[in-house]
Image: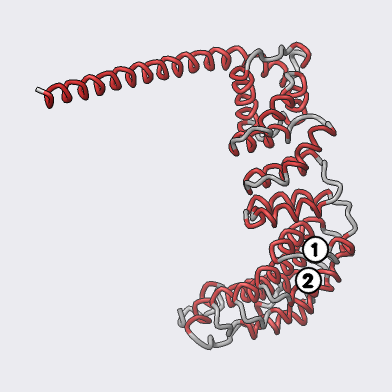
Amino acid sequence: MLVLHVIWIIAAILVTCAVILWIVLLVVHSSAKRRDRLDAGWHDVWMERLLDVLDGAEPVESLPIPGSKAEMEAVIGLLREFGERFRGSYGGRMSSVLTQIRAADFGLRLVRRRGAEQRIRGCALLAWCGPSAELDGQLHRTLEDGDPRVVLEAAAALVRRGAVEDIVPVVRALCRSGAARSLLARDVMRQWGRTATRDWSTLLAERWSEEGWTLLLEAAGTAARGEWTPLVVPLVRHPSPGVATTALMALQESGDPDGAAAAEAASRHDMESVREQAVRTLVVCGDPGRVIPVLEDLLLDESFDVRRAAMDGILKLGGRARLQGREPADPWQHELFKEAGLLASSSS
């Protein structure tokens, strides 16, 4: 009897737990459906409002302030959708809309939340809000965040807002957090480089890690300012192949003839990736009369990719006639000559 009694008690407890769980799931499901209905309703209402304002049919002042967090998120989601769909054509008006609906306050609250995903969303939102020292200050403080994704989003927001007077703290934060390895970090630096006014001589005189050099060289490549060329040329000899390659890419972007000698020396580098980029840089920066013979020698490189880059360079610089009628030295050369149309029909 005692055993049966214990079994009945356990069964009753399990049934009770099952009922409670079912009630909880029902409440959650009902709440989710209600939230979906509200979101759909706000979506319809705000879509018309926003399009009228973004198209200039209504003044931005006609927009009300969202009355709840859910409504604000629905509006921001719509704005994000418009931005992606219309590829930034509403960029100028977006900022005015965000200011009108007080999205900056919402973004600040998100940036200060515990969840990393919320902080990321907050930084992304603040990137599009209007000028504000408070927002810029918060984003600069967020560079100290412990999550590299948040640091990266804060850096991107600061650059997007044009709020980076000194890039050094931004680069150090990206390197310290590990975010510097991201391709997005390179995109951020390239965006900053296009409008950078920083004195490159002092910036490139700093002591940087491998990741730091890579980021700065990405920025230098888009800055297209010749004054940094003498500072970048020595970095072609950097022990890190990644830094050397990025330095060559920056020189290629500049097209500065002063980078040709460094590129020619790098064409004999141990690393295939460095040699391949050196060829591309040499084609842009060097004098054809000197470069073409160097590229001809590289048609015997141990890397097929380097050989292909060399062949592309020779053809681009008008050196086809120098190869016409020449016998390929090996099967790889034969393939490249065939692709370039340099073989007689009988040889193909």
Residue at position x 76%, y 27% in the image: 95
**206 left or right of 244 in image:** right
Q: Secondary structure at mark 1?
A: helix
Residue 262 coordinates in the image, percent (x, y): 77, 77
Q: Is residue 199 above or below residue 76?
A: below
Disc 1 marks which amino acid?
Ser
Instruction: Tally the numbered discs.
Output: 2
> Tell me, what colour scheme is on the image?
secondary structure
**Residue in front for this viewpoint, 15 or 72:** 15
- Mark toward the viewer: 2 or 1: 1
Residue at position x 76%, y 51% in the image: 170
Residue 100 coordinates in the image, percent (x, y): 76, 19
Proximity of marks 2 and 1: CB atoms separated by less than 8 Å:
yes
Q: Which mark is residue 87?
A: none
Looking at the image, the residue that sits furthest to the left is: 1
* Residue carrying label 2: 285
Instruction: Specify which label sits upstream in the sequence, 2 or 1.
Output: 1
Q: Is residue 59 above or below residue 3?
A: above
Where is the N terminus found, in terms of image quarters?
Answer: top left
Disc 2 marks which amino acid?
Cys
* Residue carrying label 1: 254
**Residue in front for this viewpoint, 55 or 287:** 55
Local packing at callout 2 (Cα closer than 10 Å; few below 14, some 14-19, many 20+) is many
Residue 92 coordinates in the image, percent (x, y): 77, 29
Residue 15 lies in quadrant:
top left
Residue 10 lies in quadrant:
top left
Q: Secondary structure at mark 2?
A: helix
What's the CA distance linking mark 2 and mark 1? 8 Å
Residue 45 coordinates in the image, percent (x, y): 60, 12
